[in-house]
Image: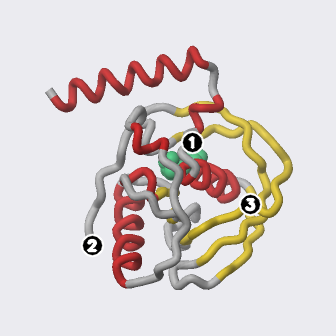
Amino acid sequence: MAILDILHHPDPRLREVAQPITEFDDELQTFIDDMFETMYAAPGVGLAATQVGDTRRVAVMDCSEDKNQPMVIINPEILQADEPQIMEEGCLSVPGISDKVTRNNHVKLRALDRDGNSYELQAEGLLAQCIQHEIDHLDGKLYIDKLSTLKRDRIRKKLQKEQRLATR
Ligand code: GNR
Ligand code: NI
C-alpha cells in the first residue's frame, strides 16, 4: 500500500483526458488500493486517477457516513441526469477552496467494477455529485471551470503562491 501525491491546480496533468481501461490485472488492483488509501488519508469522498498523474479511466469513492462503502468506477458513463441544483463543492486538487456549482441531484451510472464487471447504479445527493465530479476529472475538467473567470483567476493565483512557498 502507498499514499500517492495529489496534483494541485494549475498542474497541466489535471487537464489530460483519461483513456478507457481494458486490462484488469494485478497492477491495476494495486493502483486502486493505493487510490483508496490516498483518498481516505486525505481525507476525501472521491479520487480520480487524473489527480495522481495517471491517465487511466478510473476513480474511487466513498460517500458513506462511516467510510465503509468503497466504490470503484471504471470507464463510467452517465446514462441519465436530472434535477439540476446548486451544491457546495470542493476538490483535493484545489485545496482550501470551496464554492457553489450546479450539479444534477440524480444520475443513472453505468460503469465497470475493479474486476471488469459492468454494473448500473441510481445515485442521488452527495454520491450523484461526487460521480459527476470524478467523471469531470477523467475528462480533464475541474469544478472551478464552472465559476467566473474572476474567481478562477483568484484561485489560480492563490494556489500558485502557495506552491511557490511550499517549494522554495
Ligand atoms: O472530498 C471531496 N469532497 C467533495 C465535496 C463536494 C463535491 C465533490 C467532492 S469530491 C472531493 C474529493 C475530490 O477532489 N475528488 O476528486
Ligand atoms: Ni476533485
Q: Is residue 33 above or below residue 125?
A: below
Q: At numbered mark 1, what does the secondary structure look like: helix, strand or loop? A: loop
Residue in the picture at 40% in, 19% down: 157
Residue in the picture at 40% in, 79% down: 29
Q: Nearer the viewer, mark 3 or mark 2?
A: 3
Amino acid type of the residue tagged 2 in the rendering: Met
Residue 118 lies, in percent from the top left, at 66, 81
Amino acid type of the residue tagged 1 in the rendering: Lys
Amino acid type of the residue tagged 3 in the rendering: Ile
Residue 37 lies, in percent from the top left, at 35, 66
Q: Residue under circle 3?
A: 78
Q: Which class describes the residues within 10 Å of circle 3: few (<14), some (14-19), or many (20+)?
A: some
Residue sitting farthest toward the right? 83
Residue in the picture at 50% in, 18% down: 153
Mark pair 3, 1: CA separation: 16 Å
Residue in the picture at 59% in, 40% down: 89
Residue sitting farthest toward the top? 150
Q: Nearer the viewer, mark 2 or mark 1?
A: 1
Please tell me which of labels 3 and 2 falls first in the chain: 2
Mark pair 3, 2: CA separation: 31 Å
Mark pair 2, 1: CA separation: 28 Å
Point out the image quarter for the N terminus: bottom left
In this view, the residue in front, 45 or 52, is 52
Point out the image quarter for the C terminus: top left
